[in-house]
Image: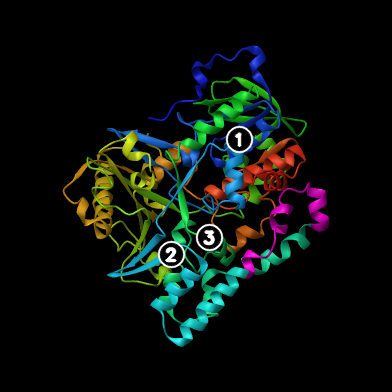
Amino acid sequence: MTRKTYRNYIKSALTKDARTFDVIIIGSGTGGMSAASCLAQAGKRVLLLEQHNVLGGFTHTFERAGYIWDIGLHYVGQVHIEGSILNKVFRYISKDKLKWAPLDDIYDRAIFGDEEYQFPRGRENLKAKLKEYFPNQKDILSIDKYFTLLDEAQNMGSGYYIEKTLPPFLSKIIGNFLRRSTLKVSDKTTLEVLRGITDNAKLIGVLTAQYGDYGLEPSKSSFYMHTLLVNHYMEGAAYPVGGASKFAEYIVPIIDESGGMALTQAEVDEIIVEKNSAIGVRIKDGEALYAKTIISAVGIVSTYSQLLSKEVSKRHELDKLLDELEPATAHVGLYVGIKESSTALALKKCNYWIFPQQYDHDKGRTEYKDFNATIPVSFVSFPSAKDPLAEKTHPGRTTAEVIMLLPYGWFKKWKNTKWQKRGEEYEALKEELAQQMFEQLYRVAPQLKGKVDYYVVSTPLSTRHFSKHRQGEIYGIAHSPQRFRQKFLRVHTPVKNLFLSGQDVITGSIAGGTMAGLLCASTILKEHLLWKINKTIK
């Protein structure tokens, strides 16, 4: 059982002196927690507010019937590589307490019908494996070209991200120069680039098999996002020892040490703005809390459309900015519990991307028009197999998860209903989806048949309820070429002393949110934290 390290807002009984802070952060996902840790370590008194009854955003876990599942953290790249930037960043924000357990060397497996394609750890290993699958000389040359493109993207530098931290006036002067090399890559779709190096649709299908990690099919996704993902996992992946909830467990004490606090069930109703300067927040119960600096880590759409007044929004034409954005995909999830250990069940420490006998991901998504259509992609993982402490903390118990991507619009008819009170038709649909997801689970783990002890299903409405993302999106803003063109996706906002953090600032993912928090804290402190971390942590 995870040790609770935070307090409930309703029961916290804040004193008058405790209502003013140096920094108030809205949202406790990785963007909020990483910023909070960095600022607290710099001596700032931080108040971290979370509307849910548990901290962590998409790193939180939930427990039912003696089983525990992660919500959004299934694996992270580079963190297990000693000396890598991400390894150092996570060590810094957790004060070296967060540890990582590497997944199997084959960390991802793509299943197309009856064919399996393995994604091994290591650049040369992956290249060799792809050439083994596609031995035709023409395909081998295409694979070499593909890796050259990945290398070029990897070596473009950090100008694009530096620009996101600049004050608006400075961005106008040098911003375009800093962004230009990245935009040359991000302006093209993944499918456009890959069709430029190969006409083998099967090869393209395999190269893009992990597209579910950012949720946008090849014809719509930015090739830059594709390169970020592939390079991120080039050396494999890892899972936090003890589970995803360790993020909050290790970061909250750091906040406490500087005189700050983290509160759950503290839903922010409004960011208080006076004379175009953010001075505090108003909680749902009407209570006002104040700080010199306000950070929103709940997404730019929620921030600009829900937390700022209509007057502020109109003054800065924020609605027009939001019109330029598309939400990322929604999903349904199946969470399964089995009364047997992962070791006894011989479950691998990897993830599975499962497809029909269909290598054209765009066609698969286009043909997915209703709940009964062929499922274009599903994701299967086993949290208890990945966590080396699971058999100690939950002996004789195994957890499995299945995720399917689907449109939020399919659930609109229930959007005005309440969580756990959506009616018989909705519950029947969830059961229908559960059986579809069990079919996918048994494709890769048939040994689980007949052994399921407990299961529960989440839908985009669950995500909407707990995260306040209006279309149940899990990756914030869709990672299209247009997204990377938006200069307002940055740390600074038009409101003085109001800053943004989280996956909308950089990219969706645990790493993206964490690095956004680091950039946000760097901007506020006027200190190059990444340089400091890289130099001081060995």
* Colouring scheme applied when the structure was drawn: rainbow
Task: Give the spatial CA distance, label 1 vs label 3.
Answer: 31 Å
Q: Which amino acid, mark 3?
A: Leu
- Dominant secondary structure of the magenta stretch? helix
How crowded is the residue under tag 1: few (<14 C-alpha within 10 Å), some, or many (20+)? many
Q: Earlier in the sequence, mark 1 or mark 3?
A: 3
In the rendered image, residue 204, in percent from the top left (x then y), is placed at 45, 74
Q: Secondary structure at mark 1?
A: helix
**Is residue 160 a member of the stretch shown in magenta?**
yes
Chain-order first, disc 2 or disc 1: 2
Residue occupied by mark 1:
307
Tell me the residue that label 2 is attached to. 120
Front: mark 3 or 2: 2
Please say whether residue 194 is one of the residues in the magenta stretch: no
**Amino acid type, label 1:** Leu
Residue type at tag 2:
Pro
146 to 259, vertically: above or below: below
